[in-house]
Image (tube, rainbow, N blue to C red):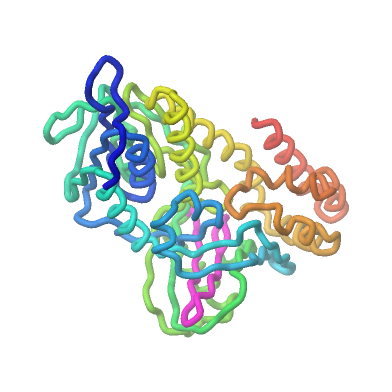
Amino acid sequence: MKARRPFLAMGSSGPVRVAVVGAGFSGLMFALSLLKEGLSVDVYEEHGRVGFPEHCTGLVSGYTAGLIGRPAERARLAEFDAVVISGPAHSVEVRPRGGVVKLDRVRLEEAMLDEVEREGGRVRLGVRAKVNSEGVVLPGGARYDIVVLAEGHFGSLAGRLGLRRRGRVFWGVNEELDYKASGPFVARFDGVTSGGFFSWFVPLGDRVLVGTASRDPRAVASYLGEARRAFGVDGSPRVKVYGGPVLAGPPVDSPRVGRVVVVGDAAFLNKPLTGGGLYPNAEAATRAAALIRAGEDPLRALERSVREVGRSLSRAYHLARLVHGRPRLVDALAQAASASGLAARLSGLVDYDRHERLLGAAARAGLPALGAAARLLSRDPLGAALLLAASLRGAVGL
């Protein structure tokens, strides 16, 4: 444990006391960021160990892996230089800046828990906590200056505090298969291998990960079978299967009630295109730490950082809904990006995780969204109009 100067509560000789409810990725990331700024942190987790139940694919950009730090290095399984984005008939290969990293989510959260304890955090596993807006945590009745509520999608505390969640929920499944494969990972938008979302193929050398998602949980198994066939791995022996909710935004409008700030899946703080929550929460936790370091009140810093990241995610929300719902549009965009050279010009400009920056990168590459919409006009007039409208809404933050 490093010796740090405590961040003192106003009018008190003691440090600011923080309770983090939930020791999934989001809770642990915020706990680590706050501990490193000298706050006193207690973590409550209802399960007896972290990382379970397993449900996340664990793909992040190099930038996000850097935000997570040492635990990400301990959990690194594979790296990819390229991503293939595919529609029903056409695909395009994009090389994101910093590449893409596949993390072992169980190992990641175990490493983060170790780091929390090394930084002086106190962790209580197997405890189902309850909180109120004044910062009181049960059992025990301890009063905290701040509560970071990271209870996940299935938690009920945020709702009891009056937070309204209105985001889209898909049901996803990951299946690891005994099949040797290499190369880039593939995201397939085709309306056949997923239900209003996309399917994915992640080669891991001696095995592959195939996954999909659907708004209807009863249809997930059928879509998974279609994905196996589309990716050419049907009949391969199953190593393991896991899954859970995939949240595609938008984030909650107001993440704070009294002394409580809601983060992670409980706040729909997820990328709207892929449902991933690692980047948004790593970014928000890192921003909060920077604000605290600059002298901002910790509670206001947490609220501000979650709001700011939520706004950036909302700018990509309309485009994500359009891409999920119109596979022909993905086809046309993939074909246009390859033929025009846009994919090559975007290589090294676009970060895998920061989708909200795609429009700016496209503009810098010399092909604004208006041009893409014009090229689509003859093939898919409605899609072109929707693309332009979604791009404009995203650009102005509606």
The boundaries of the magenta stretch are: 194-215
On screen, residue 176 above or below 262: below
Q: Is residue 47 or residue 101 the one in the foreground?
A: 101
Residue 89 visible in image: yes
Residue 302: x %, y % from top left: 42, 30
- Residue 334 in percent (x, y) is at 75, 61
Residue pushed farthest top?
11
The residue that appears at 49% across and 55% down in the rendered structure is 65
| Residue 348 position in % (x across, y down) | 70, 57
Identify whether 115 is placed above or below 234: above
Q: In which quarter of the image is residue 9?
A: top left
The C terminus sits in image quarter? top right
Q: Does the magenta stretch include residue 307?
A: no
What residue is at 45 percent from the left and 43 percent from the top?
A: 281
Image quadrant assignment for residue 73: bottom left
Q: Which is nearer the eye, 172 or 368?
A: 368
Left or right: residue 186 versus residue 88 is: left
Residue at the image position 39 percent from the left and 61 percent from the top: 105
The residue positioned farthest toward the left in the image shown: 140
Left or right of 41 on screen, residue 198: right
Residue visible at 31% across and 32% down in the picture: 5
Task: Between residue 319 and residue 27, name the one nearer to us.
Answer: 27
